[in-house]
Image (spheres, helix red, strand yellow):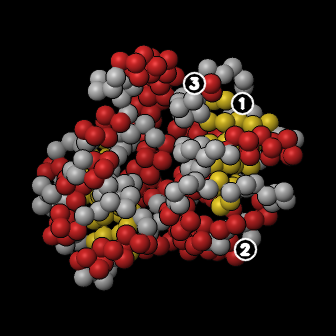
Amino acid sequence: MKIGILTFHNADNYGAVLQCYALQESLKKLFPNDEVCAADYRNNEIEKSYRILSIRKKLRANITQFLYIPAALGKRNQFKKFRERFLSLGSSDITKYDMIFYGSDQIWNPVLTAGDLSYFGNGFDGVKIAYGASDGGEIKEQEIKELLLKFKGISCREKTLAEKISCMTARKDIKAVCDPVFLLSKNAWLAIAKAPKQNGYILAYKIADNLNFDSEVEKTAIRLEKKVIQIVYLKSLRKLFCRKQHFVKGISVEEFLGYVANADLVITTSFHATAFSLIFERPFYVLKLEIRSERITDLLNSIQLEERYVEKIPEKITGCEIYSTEVKENFKTHCSGGKRFLSEVLNV
């Protein structure tokens, strides 16, 4: 049997490739005698969003973008190497598969995919299962209700979406599950992580705007007398060309894991930096954004660490002691839900 995963595997985004890898490895354990691979399906809108230079933008904007090319090319090459080494890529033709897992990520967000119904199973007649799919709050009932009724199993990333689809389809089997990265153990991630040469640092990683982020990081570093390593997302010219050692750009996926795993403290706005802080049991704070991140709050609430979602870093900073016996048990329960869904829907 040929089993495909339909997600945003080709996005140059740490979370996107790591969740795809995690689901792939989990399914390989469940289907040891079958072929499991990431379907090399490309959505034009997703591909365009990761172009280094967009031909649709004004010339002035492109001239500015030329300044990003060296770092952007370096980052793209690192993601290419990760996909070649760790992802089993299959056919882009979805009809070539016997079973397809849809997700994770915002595959059901029509703003991102230009309404591509392939992510809802359109054009595929085999077994369809959604794992941790998300819509970004944009799903439209009239377009996808009949398609979703043809799925053998559906699980969503957010509780609100699971409830929404359950109401829409009158299905009582819709589940909210953990992100695929939680399906693999800490040791499984450490096995592919590349440890940095530095130690005794605060890791800062911002993927969405927070006006207080840099000042909060700096104040915390001064208070703790720690150096800062900030992973740059190629959006700031000042940071892109900064020669200070604590700005790192174009790092590999394996290095990203290593920086999180070895940090004394992680300060972030990223869901997956938060997720891997939990997996590696590193102290962390998530700085709030103007738009509430439901998947971050759902995650932290489920393991009773909601106090780590803050507007400002508190005066009293707690470390690894946050990982109490109760928190570890809650985290174990959170992770087990995804494995249970897969076992139940596959009858294994």
Identity of the amino acid at label 2? Thr
Viewer-proximal residue, 235 or 107? 235
- Identify the residue shown where x is 45% and y is 58%: 180
Assign the N terminus to one quadrant of the image: bottom left
Viewer-proximal residue, 173 or 237? 237
For label 3, the crowd category at 10 Å Cα-Cα, with few meaning under 14, some 14 to 19 and many 20 or more, is few
- Percent across and percent down for residue 150 are 17, 70
Judge whether 29 appears above or below 141 on screen: above
Point out the tag, 3 or 1, that comes first from the N-terminus. 3
> What secondary structure is marked by label 2?
helix
| Disc ID at residue 202 | none
Identify the residue under disc 2: 325
- Percent across and percent down for residue 45 are 28, 40
Callout 3–callout 1 Cβ contact below 8 Å:
no
Point out the tag, 3 or 2, that comes first from the N-terminus. 3
- Identify the residue shown where x is 52% and y is 38%: 253
Is there any visible trace of residue 246 in the rendered image?
yes
Is there any visible trace of residue 189 in the rendered image?
no
Identify the residue under disc 3: 237
- Identify the residue shown where x is 50% and y is 17%: 67
Taking the image as shown, residue 92 lies to the left or right of residue 239, namely left
Task: Give the label, 3 or 1, closer to the camera.
Answer: 3
Distance between the alpha carbons at the discs numbered 3 and 1? 15 Å
- Identify the residue shown where x is 54% and y is 45%: 208
- Percent across and percent down for residue 182 are 52, 60
Assign the C terminus to one quadrant of the image: bottom left
> What secondary structure is marked by label 1?
loop
Point out the tag, 1 or 2, that comes first from the N-terminus. 1
For label 1, the crowd category at 10 Å Cα-Cα, with few meaning under 14, some 14 to 19 and many 20 or more, is some
Identify the residue under disc 1: 246
